[in-house]
Amino acid sequence: MSVIDLLNDNTNAHRFSFEVLPPLKGNGTETLFRNIDKLGDFDPLYINITTHHSEYVYREREDGQYERLRLRRRPGTIAVAAAIQKRYGVPVIPHVICSGTTAEKIEYELIDLQFLGITNVLLLRGDKAKEDRMFTATPGGHTHTTDLIRQVNEFNAGRFIDGSEMRNPGKPFHYGVAAYPEKHEEAPNLEMDMKYLKEKQDLGADYAVTQLFYDNRKYFAFVKKAREMGITMPIVPGIKPFAKLTQITQVPKTFHCDMPQELATEAVKCKTDEEAKALGVEWTTAQCKELYAHGVRDIHFYTVSAMDSVVQITKNLL
């Protein structure tokens, strides 16, 4: 079943999904599965699996010189997605991104996913490399998510990137995209950013999942503006509780989201990780209840470094 079919199903009013990271290279899946087990009893709608392509690292050689190498720290997104789907029987949505890869390699990813019967994906540009001031596409790769969407559309139509026709096109991909209630960090303004979102919908995106936010008023205003612009696809709110003292300042900085004054006033009072975690659970529970009360049926949780908090919030909600 496609994700849009799940999102359009009105049989349950309070639903959630969550996102996980593939294990670091050299680690197994035991910890990942233990974390998924914690939320599995709450019947998640689907599970997202992030993708992290290679990045540059500098390694010192014996002669004292440094060499630049490409290192992929978290391989295995496709394999992890297949393992989760087989183990839990839950729809999985692996991320397919532009960053750090080529159109040819993306095509191989799509072929592998199709062979495995995984045809729900989230299409993203991905983050810029740490050493770059702005996003730079890999030679032979894509600069924008819209370029990636066009490649997937061509694949769905039975055409490879070299223009040749597929003999037996498989089941087409359904895909979602990202949305930014407080605008993407590189967008000149929110309205321009939303025009890009409208373009993604017009190209075939079924739904959007937002970047995390702490102020529901910004999400409500964003959805209202989107509907006025003709963006009709579901816009799923993405939520992440802070679970450590350092995250109170790091998360808004990293994800370019504002903390409402009511939350900031309480956050500065926290002196320990335990206090920060408790505040994060309290605020996010109230935030989710308000979203549900305003007619939102589906909430997407970002669980990285906050799995236990998300488990507690889910218990509070369900």
Image (tube, rainbow, N blue to C red):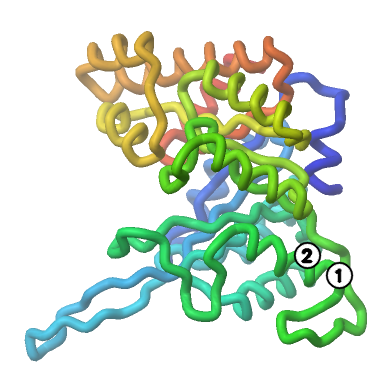
Q: Tell me: 155 left or right of 177.
A: right
Which sits in the foreground, 221 or 299? Answer: 221
Q: Are marks 2 and 1 in contact (CB under 8 Å)?
A: yes
Tell me residue 117's x, y (percent).
80, 63
Q: Residues within 10 Å of mark 2 (few under 14, many from 20)?
A: some
Is any part of residue 16 visible from this angle? no
Tell me residue 57's x, y (percent).
28, 72
Q: Is residue 284 above or below residue 198?
A: above
Q: Residues within 10 Å of mark 1 (few under 14, many from 20)?
A: some
Q: Which residue is mark 2?
A: 153
The type of residue carrying mark 1 is Ala
Which sits in the foreground, 316 or 163? Answer: 163
Q: Residue furthest left?
A: 64
Quadrant location, the C terminus: top right
Residue at image coords 53%, 11%? 286
Q: Tell me: 127 left or right of 169.
A: left
The type of residue carrying mark 2 is Asn
